[in-house]
Amino acid sequence: MNIDLSAPAASPPPAGLVRDSSDRAFKADVLDASLEAPVLVDFWAPWCGPCRALSPNIEKVVKEKADRIRLVKINIDENPAIAGQLGVQSIPAVFAFAGGRPVDAFMGNIPESEIQRFADKVIAAAGPGQPPAGSLEEQIGQALEAGRNALAAGDLNAAAQIFGMVLQHQPENAEAIIGMARVYLAAGEPDQAQAVLDTLKEPQPKNEDYVSLVAALKLAGEAAELSAIAELEQKLAQDADDHQSRFDLALALNAEGRRADAAEQLVALIRRDRTWNEDAARRKLLEFFEAWGFKDPATLKGRRLLSALLFS
């Protein structure tokens, strides 16, 4: 690490404009304080070089804006909770709060000119004197609308941040839970989306958004099965004697409801190696027949194929 001792020390910003904070003091230092003036929250760590480069520039901008905007610095090594709730994955990360909720953010060490533009935009959006915030329910409603708008615009980071802040205040808020689940689904993480949705105290059967999300998760699961089937079929195209892949393919086809195709794959495995894995293919086929029912067309076809093979 190279330290330039000849560089002049930056003068400290006016008292109150810049402060260090913590997870415990976040509500007072950020949420409550942002009701009076916008607050920038700088998530940083001592080992982060870009954080050290950003710090003097962002402090300079806040100092120049006088009391129109404030800066709170949070060391994520010592205070990981809020950063985690906001979905911070890399630092530096700077979030802007106004009216008790997050309104904007940027990641990385950006030039001072861009910090200036960011701060000006936040100050302008907050408006002169920042009108008093409404009730908590009104703020939650506004935040949920902002989260939905961010999700619709494809800004998953912003949507996750907003829904996360709502859940910090109301952990059982159904709309925020559904919104966060949609964020994970849009990010290609259906398992995490389902885990979030499962935190609902009660299903929302009459909620159109809930019904839509459940259907979307089902389709995502089906798509994952199709991907698995395609991969197994490709393995068999490369090696027809890959018995484990053929066995797994039969299970995947059955799970998708393609019973006759599943039976055909197991019969093909028996034809190639009747004793493979202690007769596993024949035993599994008999399990399928029992599960499908004796009159199921796939059972009837499978029994014909198996009989033709065994008694040929």
Image: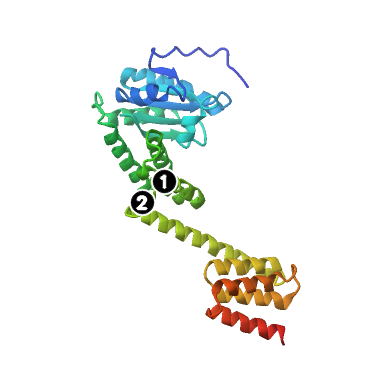
The residue that disc 1 covers is 200
Identity, as a three-letter code, of the amino acid under mark 2: Gln
**Picture coordinates of residue 95, whole percent (x, y):** 41, 31
Q: Nearer the viewer, residue 44 or 194?
A: 194
The residue shown at (55%, 66%) is 255
Q: Whole-Å distance between the Cαs marked 1 and 2?
A: 8 Å
Compared to 9, does 241 lie above or below? below
What's the mark number on residue 1? none
Compared to 246, does 170 lie above or below? above
Q: Quadrant of the C terminus?
A: bottom right
Q: Are marks 1 and 2 in contact (CB under 8 Å)?
A: yes
Q: Is residue 286 visible?
A: yes
The residue shown at (32%, 54%) is 206
Element at label 1? loop
**Picture coordinates of residue 272, whole percent (x, y):** 73, 76
Quadrant assignment, res 212: bottom left
Q: Is residue 134 left or right of residue 245?
A: left
Element at label 2? loop
The residue that disc 2 covers is 204
Badge 1 density bin: few <14, some 14–19, many ≥20, Cα 10 Å: some
Count numbered badges in the picture.
2
Q: Nearer the viewer, residue 307 or 116?
A: 307
Badge 2 density bin: few <14, some 14–19, many ≥20, Cα 10 Å: few
Q: Is residue 155 visible?
A: no
**Picture coordinates of residue 16, whole percent (x, y):** 38, 15
The extreme bottom residue here reads 312
Identity, as a three-letter code, of the amino acid under mark 1: Leu
Q: Nearer the viewer, residue 111 or 76?
A: 76
Q: How has the structure been colored for display?
A: rainbow
**Picture coordinates of residue 233, whole percent (x, y):** 62, 69
The residue shown at (45%, 56%) is 217
